[in-house]
């Protein structure tokens, strides 16, 4: 079975621009979570979506938003990019919200210049 | 105080030894606890999860949870060089938020 997929793999943007990252969960998984990981740190929780509704939100500014589609895929949007947004963005899927055994995708490396 | 704290290491053990990785968390009501392994340049992969107090064993790995002490640990028996990686502890808190520690770097010396 295919694992979690993310696109694009790498992305370079300039300050002030907007970016959209995409994630497709493992088939049958209904929950998607987004994380930001900067070098040398653990992943930081951004959002969790389950059955197309936001079920959890981390401590990120409103520039970060996300949504989940009827097929359970998800997009993460970041507006007004800052240099500090440069990081690896990870998507994780799980079978159901409460169970929460999450499986990560390969990530999208975002560089903001 | 951080939500999840881990000793960043590095931790070095000889091949065949037991590696012990530790994690503490701040939200006493947390219910779900996870250990992930992350190789350099790769995304985290789930090793184990534990919900109940006590030990949970899976092959060479044992997760231990002590909710009274707000402490989670991971033991790796018969450590192999391929176990060399960063180990991340993750906790789901009462606010339905996930917090990861900064990770412990483990090196297994052949």
Image (cartoon, coloured by chain):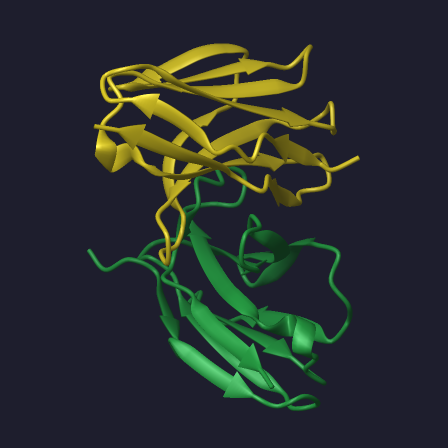
Front one among A19 and B12: B12
The residue positioned 35% from the left and 56% from the top of the image is B42
Could one spot residue B51 in this view of the protein? yes
**Total tally of numbered discs in the picture:** 0
Q: Position of residue A5 (x, y in %)?
A: 34, 66
In the rendered image, is residue A70 in sight?
no
- Whether B14 is drawn above or below A111: the answer is above
**Camera-side residue of B17 and A75:** B17
Above or below, comparing residue B40 to residue B1 in the picture? below
| Quadrant, the C terminus of chain B | top left
Which chain is represented by green in the image? A
Q: Is residue B45 above or below residue B24?
A: below
Vertical order, B62 against B3 (above or below) = above
Residue A25 relative to residue B7: left or right? left
**Percent position (x, y) of residue B16?**
23, 17
Residue at horizontal 67 percent and vertical 42 percent from the top:
B96
Q: Residue at x 59, y 39 (%)?
A: B101
- Residue B49 falls in which quadrant of the image? top left
Colour assignment, chain B: yellow
**Residue B63 location, x and y as percent?**
43, 19
The N terminus of chain B lies in which quarter of the figure?
Answer: top right
At a point 66% along the width and 45% down the height, the residue shown is B97
Q: For this view, does B24 lie left or right of residue A105?
A: right
Q: Is residue A86 left or right of residue B62?
A: right
Position in image of residue A62 (x %, y %): 77, 71
């Amino acid at each position: 079975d295919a694992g979690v997929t993310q696109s694009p793999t790498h992305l370079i943007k300039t300050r002030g621009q907007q970016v959209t990252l995409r994630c497709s969960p493992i088939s049958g998984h209904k929950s998607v979570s987004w994380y930001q990981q900067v070098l040398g740190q653990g992943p930081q929780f951004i959002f969790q979506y389950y059955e197309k509704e936001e079920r959890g939100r981390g401590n990120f500014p409103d520039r970060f938003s996300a949504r989940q589609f009827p097929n359970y895929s998800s997009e993460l949007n970041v507006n007004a990019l800052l240099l500090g947004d440069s990081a690896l963005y990870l998507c994780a899927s799980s079978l159901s919200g409460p169970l929460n055994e999450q499986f990560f995708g390969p990530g999208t490396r975002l560089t903001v210049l | 105080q951080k939500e999840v704290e881990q000793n960043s290491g590095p931790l070095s053990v000889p091949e065949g030894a037991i590696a012990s990785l530790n994690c503490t968390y701040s939200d006493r009501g947390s219910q779900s606890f996870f250990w992930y392994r992350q190789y350099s340049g790769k995304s985290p992969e789930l090793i184990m999860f534990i919900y109940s107090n006590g030990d949970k064993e899976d092959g060479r790995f044992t997760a231990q949870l002590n909710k009274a002490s707000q402490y989670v640990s991971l033991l790796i028996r018969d450590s192999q060089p391929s176990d060399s990686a960063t180990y991340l502890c993750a906790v789901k808190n009462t606010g339905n938020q996930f917090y990861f520690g900064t990770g412990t770097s483990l090196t297994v010396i052949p």
